[in-house]
Image (tube, rainbow, N blue to C red):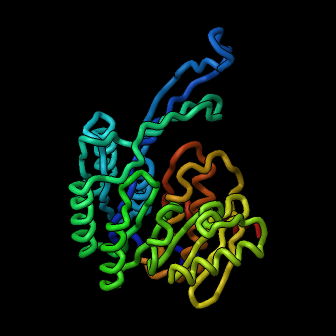
Amino acid sequence: MERLKEILNKARERNLMVIGDAMLDRYVWGVVSRISPEAPVPIVEIQRENSRLGGAANVANNVRALGASCSIACVIGNDGFGIELRDLLASQGIDTEGVIRDSQRPTTVKTRVIAHNQQIVRTDKETRDEIDGRTENAIIDRALAGMETCDAVIVSDYGKGVITKRLLSELIPRGRQKEKIISVDPKENHFRNYKQVSLITPNQYEAGAAMGRRIHDEVSLHEVGWEIVYLLEVDSLLITRGEDGMSLFRNDRTYRHFPTVARHVYDVTGAGDTVICSFTLALCAGATMEEAAEIANHAAGIVIGDVGTAAVTPEQLIASFQSTSECL
């Protein structure tokens, strides 16, 4: 417990930069008491609405919730949702100088309609086309400038067009040269462009798809895991496995599995954001790979107990470790 507190205290002194696909997560909450006469669908009587930070913006929000400083490089549209997203970032103390407005793209918005804690439907407003050259130049310039003062870079790739091959080809070598921690929450279509990053955190499906096979047991898990480590020359690979926890592969041929500590699973939305944030920040604070993975495992167990995207605080992490210890 003292070691955990030491790491969390040091984390408050760190500064991280997040680069990637920021989005606005909108939630429409209501109740269902009847079926529409127009079609066999439920009628949701809306009781309240709210917005949260999603995607790369949720990663940045998790960094701030753990007490560290954070800047973000992302793209928004020239629309009301973009203004709302930028204002939400600023309200959490996140440096928004790298928020680039592109009038040719909409702000990515995911709207979830929830009744009785059950998601009824989700609507997405987005484009998956890669950003144009002007916007790409602006993101690269901001990313390289931010690297000068940050302790680590988190690449949050949701496949919405902000993370490009050229961005990665300039960002990763510069980060390695400056001995910065570079962590990636990946998408399959860019998988081979993440070569030589410090950490990559695919879920089980993404890891298998990237290698052209399905992970269905421990044998296939290890085959895929070690293949990724050597193909990409990464320092470490953390495969998240849902209710089966997460598995850490390191380039020194060491492996460790972390069983899930979640007691209740309500919503896995944003869990990957919390994992990569808490793992990276713990590394910046001097944690070993295994310590960082353990902290990330507890952080994920906390957020999936809430409906919608959520952020974890140091106090919640301490309580989770204490609770687990008491159960042993």
Which residue shows up at 39% across the image and 63% down it? 67
**Is residue 49 something that shows in the picture?**
yes
Question: Quadrant of residue 145 in the image?
Answer: bottom left
Give coordinates of residue 245: x percent, y percent.
69, 65
**Quadrant location of the C terminus?**
bottom right
Give coordinates of residue 323: x percent, y percent.
68, 63
Q: Nearer the viewer, residue 129 or 73?
A: 129
Which residue shows up at 32% across the image and 64% down it? 69
**Quadrant location of the N terminus?**
bottom right
Does residue 238 appear to the left or right of 178 in the view shown? right
Which residue shows up at 25% across the image and 71% down it? 144
Q: Nearer the viewer, residue 63 or 83?
A: 83
Give coordinates of residue 249: x percent, y percent.
62, 80
Against 157, is 229 above or below?
A: below
**Is residue 321 something that shows in the picture?**
no
Q: Nearer the viewer, residue 212 or 319?
A: 212
Against 252, is 14 above or below?
A: above
Give coordinates of residue 39: x percent, y percent.
65, 14
Q: Nearer the viewer, residue 328 or 114?
A: 114
Which residue shows up at 51% across the image and 29% down it? 28
